Amino acid sequence: MKRNLLHQGDCVAGMTELPAGSVDLVFADPPFNIGYKYDVYEDRKNADEYLSWSRTWADQVHRVLKPNGTFWLAIGDDFAAELKVLFQRDIGFSCRSWVIWYYTFGVNCTKKFSRSHTHLFHFVKNPEAFTFNTEAIKVPSARQLVYQDSRAKAGGRLPDDTWILRPQDLPSGLTPDEDTWYFPRVCGTFKERAGFHGCQMPERLLGRIIEVSSNPGDLVFDPFAGSGGTLIVAKKLGREWLGFEFSENYAARIRERLDATVVGQALDGADDPLTSAPSTKNGKRLDEKEKENKKRRRFVRR
C-alpha cells in the first residue's frame, strides 16, 4: 500500500492489507461510543460489541506496528479503563504513560461535574526499545526559570503528564516555572477549525506526540482520520503518512486540506504558552452537522 495517501473505507479491512511491522507510529482517536452522530457512522453500540470491535482494530494496530513502534490512543472516560486493560493484557501493548489532556470549554453538564479532559494512552510494543525523542519536547525547569540554580540542566526537562490548555483558567494562573502541557482546544469558532468534523485535535498536541514518538521519514498512521489532523501534522513535520476514513464526505475534505499542506509549514495554534485562544476566523459558523452534534453531545453527557 502506497504511503502519503488517505484511503476511504473501513480501517479494519484496510489494515489487513498493510504488511506486518511496517508502521512506526499510530495515533488513534476512535469513536468514543457516546452517541455522537458522525456522517455515516452511528456511535452507539452496546458495551460488549464496542469492546469487541475495539479489540479487532487494535489487534491490527499491534500487527502493523514495527517491533519498536508506538501507539497513542485518545479516548473518553466511558471506556478508558476497559480499553487500557484490554490493550495491555489481551493484545500485548505496554503502557508507558497515561496522560491527562485538560481543557476548558467542555460540554456543560447539569447533573454531574462537567467533563474537561481526554485520556491519552502512550503504548509501545517493546518497553525496552521504542522511539522517544526527549530533546524534541523538553521544557525549561523551575530551577532554570525561577531559582537560577547552577545545578539545572541547560537543556531543560521532560514535561509532566498533565496537559493544561489555558493557563489563565487555573486558580492562580500558570507561571513559567510550571512544566505542564497545555494546548488550546479547537473550539467551533477558532481559525484552526476545519468546520466539517466535530472531533478535531489541536495541531500543537499532535505535533508533540509525533515529534517525541517518531523521526523524520518515519511512517505515521491514523486509522480514524476524522478531520485529517494527524496526517496534516505528520506531513508538516516531514514524516510519511497514511490514513483511513470511513466517510466519503470526510475523506474528500481531508484530501483538500492535505493538498493545501506543505512540508515544513508551521503548525496551527498559539506558539507562546501564555497566549490565549488562537484567532477566530471572520464569519466562522458551524455547519448544520456540527450544530446537530453539539446538541446531541449536550443531551448525552448531561
Image (cartoon, rainbow, N blue to C red):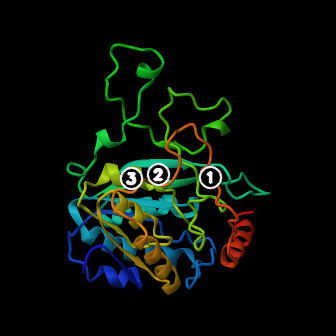
Which amino acid, mark 2? Arg
Q: Earlier in the sequence, mark 2 or mark 1?
A: 2
Left or right of 288? Residue 145 is left
Element on which disc 3 rests: helix
Q: Earlier in the sequence, mark 3 or mark 2?
A: 2
Residue visible at 68% across and 70% down in the picture: 286
The residue labelled by disc 3 is 209
Left or right of 265? Residue 76 is right
Q: Is residue 104 above or below residue 52?
A: above
Which amino acid, mark 3? Ile
Marks 3/1 in contact by CB < 8 Å: the verdict is no
What's the distance in space between the residues labelled 2 and 1, CA to CA? 15 Å
Quarter occupied by residue 195: bottom right
Which amino acid, mark 1? Ser
The residue labelled by disc 2 is 204
Query: Mark 2 or mark 1: which is in front?
Result: 1
**Percent x, y of residue 180:** 50, 37
Q: Is residue 58 above or below residue 109?
A: below
Residue extending furthest right? 110
The residue labelled by disc 1 is 279
Q: Is residue 199 above or below residue 116?
A: below
Q: Quadrant of the N terminus?
A: bottom left
What's the distance in space between the residues labelled 3 and 2, CA to CA? 9 Å
Query: Mark 3 or mark 1: which is in front?
Result: 1
**Percent x, y of residue 179:** 47, 33
Q: Earlier in the sequence, mark 3 or mark 1?
A: 3
Front residue of 283/23: it is 283
Q: Quadrant of the C terminus?
A: bottom right
